[in-house]
Every structure is written in structure tokens, then in C-alpha cells.
Amino acid sequence: MIHGWILEGTYGPGDRLPRDEDLAVQIGCARSTVHRAMGVLAEKGIVDRKRRGGTSVRPRLTRATFEIPVMRSDIELSGAQYDYRLLSCNRGDATDEVMAHMSITDPQDLLHIQSLHYADGVPHFSEDRWVSLRVVPEIMDVDLSQISANEWLLKNRPFLRAELSFAAVPCPKEQAPLLNCAQGEAIMMSERLTWIDQGAITFLRAWTQPGYTLNTQV
Amino acid sequence: MIHGWILEGTYGPGDRLPRDEDLAVQIGCARSTVHRAMGVLAEKGIVDRKRRGGTSVRPRLTRATFEIPVMRSDIELSGAQYDYRLLSCNRGDATDEVMAHMSITDPQDLLHIQSLHYADGVPHFSEDRWVSLRVVPEIMDVDLSQISANEWLLKNRPFLRAELSFAAVPCPKEQAPLLNCAQGEAIMMSERLTWIDQGAITFLRAWTQPGYTLNTQV
DNA sequence: AAGTGGTCTAGACCACTGA
DNA sequence: CAGTGGTCTAGACCACTTG
């Protein structure tokens, strides 16, 4: 397609571009073609578009995209054997912090699940998960020692929106024995909150084996 | 628009969808409308499309997007005052590892820059950067104590492609005094390699203040 | 209120690729 | 090699928002 032309030649950060229609004439194509191309650039974070305000080149910044890690696929793709073990599953032991995240007031509405995911028998990913029983009551009937909550949820309650975060943390003392690493060792912690129309489905806090790297491209 | 309809109702992971044209008839809109909507879903990683192979729902996975962190903007957006200090700037002291990353054989072709970025006077981000003098020879004439290499490069050599990675690491002993934290403390290390047509522009390895979190949404 | 982007249509033609 | 998605057009109409 006709990408990148303009920016890397004539216009710099902050500049306002001609309207779609003029650009189309200038380039010699239909307005819808320009519009589509601009849509891609806007998606990438290269330009800002406003009705009546025109299109302008963003000061800097860019957007990167990465695949949300899914343990089973990640592990199997790397050629290792995937294993999963349910550690615990209790109703009602959510902290206030977790309830606040999920906009839930009654601890009985949350199921707390701890589990471990292995790659070739080595613990690779340890997760603490809370599932909303208001949104997903059926999960009480699922045998979570056979299928991980993640896989069951993805099949039965695909989420519409998610928030993710990643941070470097010292390995907490409860996680150290699970991941078979030293307490305080630097590991990646991730949090994930997923939503469906009716509300929060599940909140997840997970710790990954030291050395885990998050990769992405632009 | 007409997003999300199909998936969250009738088709599950792995299913093959009707061809665009049939969907269009079924829904009662033009094929191009379906095509555009499918393009969005494919972008999000929800469906796979192949010519002649049709459109199918991806097993799981999804794609998340985040803004590439740019220190000055991040810090100023958070309301803190941004400051920058050049620590060192030497030609020719690249390691083999760095040269391999950038596909460069002569160490003299690389400029090594160390710098610190402050938020409200507190060291927030420490970077080791190598810049290709074959692609960006003019940088030798820039006073890097006045403008950070990052800002200069973004203005003068906007990249077309980038690879990023993030990992949790123990703070290296050279970085500890710079970031004013303890050696071995868990911090986020990021690497960034940016490209232009002619080759690698710059490779960056950076360490962030403990507590730094990478956020994203879907 | 006018100007800009946003959405959609109906149709043509192309290009890849898997049955 | 036929069927599918990919790209483009020329045009209509809508909706926001800013000058």
C-alpha cells in the first residue's frame, strides 16, 4: 500500500497534514484509499486525527503490539512439555485490594485459585487468580485440577477488554518454593484484569521464572 | 461499527467462518464492510485470514498494544520535572555482542553513550546506547550534553522498525550507584533496537528505577 | 455553521494459495 | 486453477468539533 510516503519525507513531528481529499488528488488515488492508509498510521500512533481538526503528525511516541502470553501455547511452542497443577481453590479469601480491583464487595463472590504451570517439569509460571462467581457461577462445577481456569475461561467466557501490567519484583517468599528460586531474586510479575459486558471476570497476579523476557516489535 | 457480533455468540475457537460475501448477505451489509470489520479482528489477533483458506477463529491468544515509553514525555506527563545528564560518550568501545546485534563489524563505527534521565531530580532511567556512525554520522557534531541522543534521533532519523524487550533483572553493580538503588535489587531492564532502511540506527539497553510498571490495555 | 474525518456501498479487478 | 481474501474506486451521507 502507500504507507510511510509522506511522513518520512516532507512532514515532521507536530505538522498538520493536508486534508484527505487534497492528499488523494496530490497522490492520484481515491479519498477512501488515503483514509484507509491514514487509519493504519493512526493505529500505529504516528498521526492524530480529529474531525474538523485535520490530521497531524504526533510529536513522537509510537505504539508497539505484543501477543498476550498464554502459558500453554508459549511453552508448547518452545518445544517443551506443558504441565499444570492446581494448588488450591477456595471461596471467599479475597483481600480488599483484589475486591476493589474487581468492583466486588462480598468476598463470597470470589473464587481464589492458585496454580502452577510447568515447562518440561520445571515450574515456569505461578498464578494467583480470583474469579467472579457473579459473572461466572458455573466455574464452581468445573474440575480445575483437570483444566486450568485460564483455558476454561477463554473457552467459555471470552473477554472483551483486558488490562495488563508488568513489573520487576523481588520473588516473594510464598512464591520462591513454588518457582524453585531464591526469595528476593528478580522476577517478572504480571497482573491481568479481564472484563466482559457484565463486569470483571477474573483478576490474575502471576510470577514468572527468572529470565523471562517479554518481546515485541513495531 | 458491527464488531464482535459473530464471535461472542456463534463461533468458538478454531471454527471456520463463512466467507465475507455470505456474512455480508447474512448481516445485510456490503462485503467491504465485513472485510473491514474482519481486518480489525485480524489486527486484534482474534481471527486468522488466509486467501482461499477462509477466515477462522484463532485458538486463543490476543494482542495487546502499548505506547513505547519515551522518558521525557512519561516523566513530564506524570507531572514531574524532567532532567537529563550525559555521563559519557566514546567511540569504539562496543562489545562483540552489541556489534552482532547491530550487524556491524568495526567498533569504530559505533558511538557509545551513557546517560541518565531524572524525574524531579531523582534518577529514573539509566541508558547505555550505541549509535551507528555509518547510518548517522552527523551525530558526532551534536552536543549530546544539551539534547539527549533519543530526542535528537527521533527528530532526525525517525525509525521505521523496532524490536523491544523487557526483563526483570537484578540491578548490575555499575547501575546501582546511578539509579541510587541497591545492587541486586529487582529492576526492569529493557532493550531496544531500531532500524531504518539502510540498517540499524541504535541499540539501547536501559534500566529503570525499582517499581517501574509497564501498563497496557486491550 | 462549515469543514473535517468516519462510515458505508456496489462493484471491479488482482493475487495468492490450498483443495 | 478456482475460490478466497486484498486492494482500490467514486460517490453518498453522517457526526463531530472547532474556528
Image (cartoon, coloured by chain):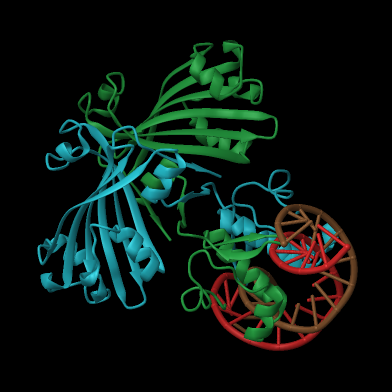
Chain colours: A green, B cyan, C red, D brown
Place residue B124 in its image quadrant. top left
Could you say where residue B66 lies in the image, as x and y percent from the top left?
Answer: 48, 49
Considering only vertical position in the picture, is A49 above or below A173?
below
What residue is drawn where x is 52% and y is 36%? Answer: A151
The residue lying at 56 percent from left, 65 percent from top is A41
Q: Examine the rendering and report whether any part of residue B156 can be seen.
A: yes
Q: Is residue A126 above or below residue B206?
A: above
Of the pair A75 and A125, the residue shown nearer to us? A125
Quadrant hosting residue A117 = top left
**Left or right, residue A20 beside residue B86:** right
Q: Quadrant of residue A196?
A: top right
Which residue lies most toward the left here?
B93
A137 to B62, vertically: above or below: above
Rendered location of residue A63, percent (x, y):
48, 55
Q: Is residue B19 visible?
A: no
| Total numbered badges shown on the rendered structure | 0
Please report the residue visible at 50 percent of the width from the left and 25 percent of the height from the top: A144
In this picture, residue B68 sits left or right of residue B83: right
Identity of the residue drawn at 47% across and 78% down: A9
